[in-house]
Amino acid sequence: MFITSDQGSRLPAGADPQAMLTGGRLIGRLVCRVLGLGLLLAAAALWLMPGSSFATEVLLFKVFLAVCALTAGIGFFQAGAPRPARQVRVDMARRQFRLVQPEGALGQRLLRTCAFEDLSRVERGGPYLRLWDGEGHFLAELLIEEEAEMARLLAALRQAPRHCSQMRRTC
């Protein structure tokens, strides 16, 4: 049985939740988008603005600049697009969590796996389950809305040999 959650991808594996509050990625994406849009507009304005001669050298230089600006503008604009959300998959048969990144239409890339026994901490806050790996790095946050699924997952986590006492305190 698999439990899948899109909510588990708010933070990358190994990231500190406090370090992610600064919004650096959002500002970086915004700068890429603005720079890309500016380059695309500059490439268009290069041909729309009057005042240049129709000499061969000038036209060739304008074509070169327009192609470079278009290429860089499209690249920056695409680099500023948000990435697809990472997903957390819970494999109850193998007793492990998988962090996967969707790529393309059908592809996925496995970013990380963590067995139930290797978790250092698990916290429950309402329908959310927060997981930390063996080194104490934040792994994922699961949203499990069905209480029966939450109870089954918590029972499986409590059966893990290493952290059963830790689970009773935090969940």
Image (tube, rainbow, N blue to C red):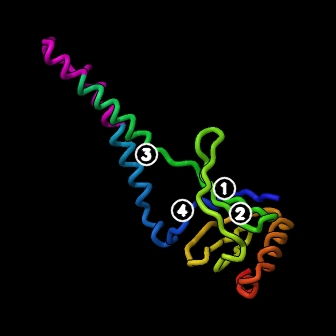
Q: Secondary structure at mark 3?
A: loop
- Label placed on residue 80: 3
Whole-Å distance between the Cαs marked 4 and 2? Answer: 16 Å
Whole-Å distance between the Cαs marked 1 and 4? Answer: 13 Å
Please indicate whether residue 157 sits to the left or right of residue 138 in the image.
right
Point 67% across, 59% down: residue: 88
Whole-Å distance between the Cαs marked 1 and 3? Answer: 21 Å
Q: Quadrant of residue 129?
A: bottom right
- Label placed on residue 6: 1
**Given contact means CB atoms under 8 Å apart, are the residues at marks 3 and 4 in contact?**
no
**Given contact means CB atoms under 8 Å apart, are the residues at marks 2 and 1 in contact?**
yes
The image shows residue 55, relative to residue 38, as above or below, that is above
- Label placed on residue 12: 4
- Reading the image, the residue beneath label 2 is 143
Location of the C terminus by quadrant is bottom right
Identity, as a three-letter code, of the amino acid under mark 1? Asp
Residue 31 lies in the magenta-colored region: no
| Residue 99 placement (x, y as % from top left) | 63, 60
Whole-Å distance between the Cαs marked 3 and 4? Answer: 18 Å
Task: Report the span colored magenta.
Answer: 37-63
Q: Nearer the viewer, mark 3 or mark 4?
A: 4
First in residue order: circle 3 vs circle 4: 4
Whole-Å distance between the Cαs marked 3 and 2? Answer: 27 Å
- Label placed on residue 129: none
First in residue order: circle 4 vs circle 2: 4
First in residue order: circle 1 vs circle 3: 1
Q: Nearer the viewer, mark 1 or mark 4?
A: 4
